[in-house]
Image (spheres, rainbow, N blue to C red):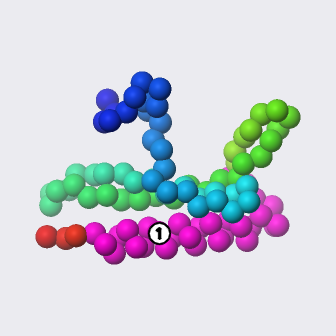
């Protein structure tokens, strides 16, 4: 059972941070895991492109040549965010 979630959003994990450039976005997700030293937060990044197919909005992880710079920049921003979050971890 998910912690602190309403029935509407049950099972759907929202990103901690999203970096969007044009139709390309890099989403950072935080996951808490248990270790022998206690709980720690690890992060993962998902990169995707939003597009329309008729009236439907869809997402893909495929990029054409013109979209690659946007994907690279969104990933760079996400990398910086994750690095700052990891650096600020308090270790006992």
**Quadrant in which the N terminus is drawn:** top left
Q: What residue appears at the point 40 percent right and 73 percent down from the top-left corner? A: 84
Residue denoted by label 1: 81
Label 1: state its secondary structure: helix
Looking at this rendering, what residue extends furthest in the top direction? 7
- The answer to whether residue 8 is above or below residue 87 is above
- The answer to whether residue 41 is above or below residue 69 is above
Residue 73 location (% of width, % of height): 65, 71
Q: What residue appears at the point 47 percent right and 69 percent down from the top-left corner? A: 81
**Quadrant in which the C terminus is drawn:** bottom left
- The answer to whether residue 85 is above or below residue 44 is below
Residue 47 location (% of width, % of height): 61, 57
**Mark 1 packing: few (<14 Cα in 10 Å), some, or many (20+)?**
some
Residue 21 location (% of width, % of height): 69, 63
Q: Quadrant of residue 74?
A: bottom right
**75 and 17: which is toward the camera:** 17
Q: Which residues are magenta?
A: 61-89
* Secondary structure mainly formed by the magenta segment: helix
Q: Is residue 21 magenta?
A: no
Position of 31 with respect to 81 (left or right) is left
Q: What residue appears at the point 44 percent right and 67 percent down from the top-left corner? A: 82
């Amino acid at each position: 059972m998910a912690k602190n979630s309403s029935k509407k959003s049950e099972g759907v994990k929202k990103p901690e941070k999203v970096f969007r450039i044009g139709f390309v976005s890099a989403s950072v997700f935080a996951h808490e895991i248990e270790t022998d030293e206690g709980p720690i937060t690890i992060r993962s990044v998902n990169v995707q492109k939003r597009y329309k197919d008729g009236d439907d909005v869809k997402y893909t992880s495929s990029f054409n040549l013109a979209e690659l710079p946007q994907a690279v920049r969104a990933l760079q921003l996400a990398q910086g965010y994750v690095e700052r979050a990891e650096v600020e971890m308090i270790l006992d």
